[in-house]
Image (cartoon, rainbow, N blue to C red):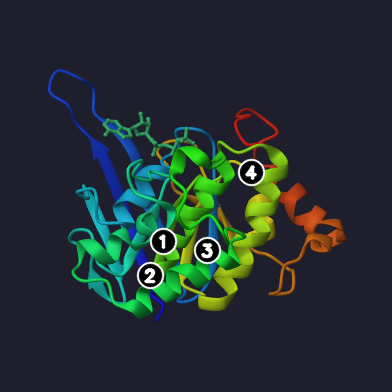
Amino acid sequence: MTSRVGIKDLEITFTRSGEQPTTALSGLDLDIEAGTFLSIVGPSGCGKTTLLRAVAGLLELTGGSVTIDGDQVAGPRRETCVMFQSPTLLPWLNVLDNCLLPKKLRGRVQPVAEERATELLVRAGLKGFEKKYPYELSGGMQQRVALCRALGTDPSLLLLDEPFGALDAMTREQMNLDLHEMWARQSPTTVLITHSISEAVFLSQRVVVMSPRPGRVLEIIDVPLPDKREAPVMAEEAFARTCAHIRSYFTKGERNVDG
Ligand SMILES: Nc1ncnc2c1ncn2[C@@H]1O[C@H](COP(=O)(O)OP(=O)(O)OP(=O)(O)O)[C@@H](O)[C@H]1O
């Protein structure tokens, strides 16, 4: 199952007593089709994480609306899964048990869930690591476990907030290939926040460019690449052209977006 997201005239203003209010988002409109992979890029502080938290139901809106499959988002939803930059694994649980944690929190773990988690771990290159503890894994491996845990819940909406931001460039590129392959099997509606233009273009069908704060949508770019993404795609002229187009938004002024 996949979800359709509708964001209409969204405004989020943070108010703390004795301080000037901060309007993070204003007049933001965005429709996300079911089953698509969409990335969001924008200058630092433009409200990307705020937008993701609003879609996840973790924030009160100051104005406008966020709907999932036509229902107003009024709080966290079971079918929505959020993954952050840090893998947030529990250090006292092994890899398999970390993957199964969301199921455990919802009740008894069926053998089929264990089989599925094991299968996801194998696909993520973690065969043989099921009984290891997080401290025995590299940062990239820990993020892979977090990704398996997220996909194991069969989310209809997957929200990824800079999940590979802390990884070195080579691990990150491999993670992008793995994420695409794993995503393609389930195709949950996915929203990725990233500071990397090439990561956004490689993974997405559409890339949203946001304005500086208060964030709103400047442009939605359809990525002219085949649905199946493999490493050679990055050498294509269309890939370079799309990256250059997005980069042009950031070459004057803000420089907080990487290549
Ligand atoms: N809980 C909060 N209380 C007050 N202000 C906040 C809060 N969360 C975010 N902000 C402010 O809202 C603005 C947008 O923050 P947000 O984290 O969404 O930006 P971002 O685009 O994700 O930034 P970055 O790319 O640097 O991670 C910033 O000015 C930030 O200081």
Q: Secondary structure at mark 4?
A: loop
Q: CA distance from mark 4 to mark 2?
A: 24 Å
Residue 87 versus residue 241 in the image, above or below: above
User: Is 259 situated left or right of 92 in this image?
Assistant: right
Q: x, y percentage for residue 62?
A: 21, 47
Q: Single out the residue that lies furthest toward the top.
A: 18
Q: Amino acid at mark 2?
A: Pro
Residue toward you, 103 or 58: 103
Q: Secondary structure at mark 2?
A: loop
**Which of the 4 image quarters holds residue 19?**
top left
Q: Secondary structure at mark 1?
A: helix
Check if mark 2's residue and mark 3's residue have beta carbons within 8 Å.
no
On the image, numbered disc 1 is attached to which residue? 150
Q: Indicate which disc residue 121 carries.
A: 3
Does residue 204 show up?
Answer: no
Q: Nearer the viewer, mark 2 or mark 3?
A: 3
Q: CA distance from mark 1 to mark 2?
A: 7 Å
Quadrant location of the C terminus in the rendered image: top right
Mark before the other along the chain sequence, 4 or 1: 1
User: Is 46 situated left or right of 65 in this image?
Assistant: right
Mark before the other along the chain sequence, 2 or 3: 3
Residue shown at 70%/50% (left/top)? 173
Q: x, y percentage for residue 10?
A: 31, 53
Q: Indicate which disc residue 155 carries.
A: 2
On the image, numbered disc 4 is attached to which residue? 196
Q: Amino acid at mark 3?
A: Leu
Are there few (<14), some (14-19), or many (20+) residues within 10 Å of tag 3? many
Q: x, y percentage for residue 150?
A: 41, 61
Q: CA distance from mark 1 to mark 3?
A: 12 Å
